[in-house]
Every structure is written in structure tokens, then in C-alpha cells.
Image (cartoon, rainbow, N blue to C red):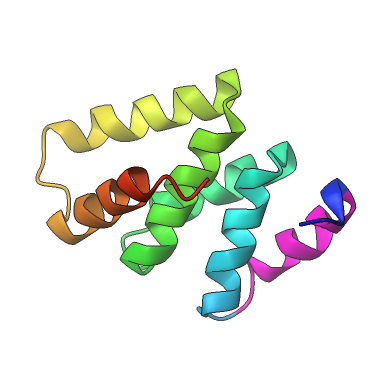
Amino acid sequence: LDAGKSICPFLFEKLTDKPSFAREQATRGLGILAYEPATNTLNAILNDSTESIYMRAESYFALKKQNTKKARTLLEDFSVRNNNKSLDSALVDQINLLETQDVY
């Protein structure tokens, strides 16, 4: 991440790749660098139940790391939508794991 925000467009392109560890790491990088143009894509991944729990958890934390009004609203909406139904416990566990590890 020494390249700074100049690497963000490259990382953003990786979000369209096939599921892979590199795609998860690109998501993490976009969060660390708070790359706002990725907000809608990260939100779509977070809310896509066909995505892996790892990718969805990384998207959650990337949005959390952005810490913009829009990202906070999207995360609040996600929580409200999933509050009334059983959220996949594996996803919750992965989100909690990332949070306790403080990977950012």
C-alpha cells in the first residue's frame, strides 16, 4: 500500500475478478485507502448472499474503514435489513473475527 491512492483504480478492477484471495485483499486495500468510488460496489458485494462470507466480511470492513456518511448509512441499512432475519452465523463470525483482530 506504499503506492497510496494511485493504486486504487487497479484494486477496484480486481473486484470484478473471479473469487480469489487477491480479490479479498483488493477489497481490504480499498478500505484501508478509503477509496470512495468503490462504495456502491462494496455495498453490492456485502448484500450479495451468493458471495463468500470472507468477501462479504471484507466488504463490510472496507465500508466501515471508509467512515463516510454514505458508508455509515449503508452499514446501518444492512444491519436494519438483517436485524429481523437470521443473518448467516458464519458471516457474523467472520465479521467479528476481523473486528477482534483489528486488521485495519
Q: Is residue 89 left or right of residue 69?
A: left
Residue at the image position 28 percent from the left and 32 percent from the top: 79
Q: Quadrant of residue 32?
A: top right
Q: Is residue 34 left or right of residue 27?
A: right
Asked if residue 30 is positioned above or below residue 68 in the image, the reply reads below
Say which quadrant the N terminus sits in.
bottom right
Asked if residue 74 is positioned above or below residue 53 in the image, the reply reads above
Q: Quadrant of residue 99?
A: top left
Magenta stretch contains residue 99: no
Name the chief secondary structure element in magenta. helix
- Which residue occupies the foreground of this view, 97 or 15? 97
- Which residue occupies the foreground of this view, 97 or 16? 97
Asked if residue 70 is positioned above or below residue 61 in the image, the reply reads above
Q: Is residue 94 left or right of residue 19?
A: left
| Magenta segment | 6-17
Q: Position of residue 12 (x, y in %)?
A: 72, 59
Q: Position of residue 60 (x, y in %)?
A: 43, 45
Q: Position of residue 50 (x, y in %)?
A: 34, 68
Q: Position of residue 47 (x, y in %)?
A: 38, 49
Q: Is residue 93 left or right of residue 68?
A: left
Residue at the image position 25 percent from the left and 33 percent from the top: 81
Magenta stretch contains residue 15: yes
